[in-house]
Every structure is written in C-alpha cells, then in structure tokens.
Amino acid sequence: MNTTTLKVMVIDEDPKFNETYAYYFSTYREYHLAGIYRTVEDALEDYDLVCPDIVLTEVSFSGLSGIDGLIEFQKSENSAMVIMVSYEDDYNGITKAFKFGAEGYLTKPLSKKGLRQALNSIKYEGAAISNDIAKKIISMYRRKTYECFSERENQIIEYLGQGATYKAIADKLFVTTSTINFHIQNIYVKLNVNSKSEALKKIREMDIA
C-alpha cells in the first residue's frame, strides 16, 4: 500500500450518499477518490485498472453483494483493503465480512470526521470498526456463557459451536468421551432437542433474542 495519497474505490448504489462521499473526499488530502460505482459488477470491471488501495463498499446490493465483491477482489494481484459499510449491525453479517477478509466494518450514516478516522485506522493500523459494532461484538462474546448451563456445559457448547467432535472436546477438557456424551445429553434435555444441529440452532436463537 502507498505511504502517501491512497486511492479509494467507493461502491454504493445510493446516489445521495455518493454525493456525500464525493464531498468528503474533496476535503481529504491523503485520500484520493478513484471512482464511485453503483454496483459491484461495475467496480469489478475497473478494479484492476484502478488498482485501489482501499475499497469502501456497501454490504447489500440488488445484484452481487458486497461480500461477493470482497471475495472477487481477493482474487486479484492488487491487494486492496476492504471496508464494509451498512445501515445494519447484524452480528452474522459482521462476522461473515471479517471471515471473508474485510479489514473494516462501518455503520451508516458516516460523518466526514468518522470516515477519515476509519481510513486512517486502515492506513496506519490495518483495521477499522465502528464503535457500535465493537460494542455489539463484545456484547455477543460476553453472552457466550448461558445461565441455564453449568460451567462445563458452557465449555462444551463453545467447542460444539466451533465444530469440534466429542473426542476432540474430551481431549481438550481432559475427560472421557462418555463424560462429554453425558454432559451433551443434559444440554439436549435443557434445550428440549434431540440432535447437535438442533441444539446449535436453538443456541443461536438464544444469542439473537
């Protein structure tokens, strides 16, 4: 990435917000607006030609989504850093964005100062995230302990969510697989389910509630 003026590609189908972006960037010395695109498809066509340092993209579009674009951008030799932007602070959407390689996630509306701070965070620290997103992520992690389960059951639930097998969980907790099975049966009873998939689904619903 350049150390002086950085080229930024914006992808947002809202014409009013694009006017706002154009104004914001006209006031930034260290960031150059290399192009504004209404669709991910149009941005992909010019991506290698523009060679942006940073891509600022809305998450939701009527065609390819911002996540789809993120995946495609990574296939290019040009390693731009990607900031996802959305009106929503959906936890699943946030984790999906970071899973597929986003370096930042911001919620609208964006102020001129707030966007500049986010761009600076990407430039100097390699990551950017809105305060409300950070608080939501912290809150979600704090909620990983469920009062209706014992400490051991909460540990097992965490490993189950990571896709670990009964044997792997037993090895991590230094117990036998039969002990793990005993705890899991208790978890099923408390959740009123009969399978791992049903249990994880119900736990995810507890997270959202």
Image: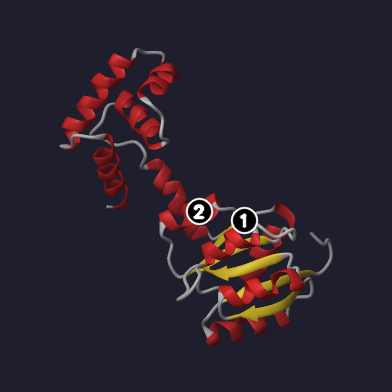
How many residues crowd mark 2 within 10 Å: few (<14), some (14–19), many (20+)? some
Q: Is residue 93 above or below residue 175?
A: below
Front label number (1 vs 2): 1
Left or right relative to 196: residue 109: right
Display colour scheme: secondary structure
Secondary element type, mark 2:
helix
Kind of residue at disc 1: Glu
Q: Which residue is mark 2?
A: 134
Specify the farthest residue to the right.
4
Instruction: Using the image, tell me which numbered label, if any, was put on residue 103.
Output: 1
Q: Residue 13: percent from the left, percent from the top?
A: 53, 80
Q: Position of residue 174 (x, y in %)?
A: 41, 13
Quarter holding the N terminus is: bottom right
Q: CA distance from mark 1 to mark 2?
A: 13 Å
Q: Specify whether residue 144 is in view.
A: yes
The crowd level at tag 1 (other Cα within 10 Å; few <14, some 14-19, many 20+) is many
Tell me the kind of residue under disc 2. Ala
* Residue 50 quadrant: bottom right
Q: Please give the name of the residue rendered at 26% of the width and 26% of the height, measured from the top-left corner.
A: 184
Residue 106 visible in rendering: no
Please tell me which residue lies in front, 10 or 28.
10
Position of 104 relative to 196 (above/below): below
Q: Quadrant of residue 71?
A: bottom right
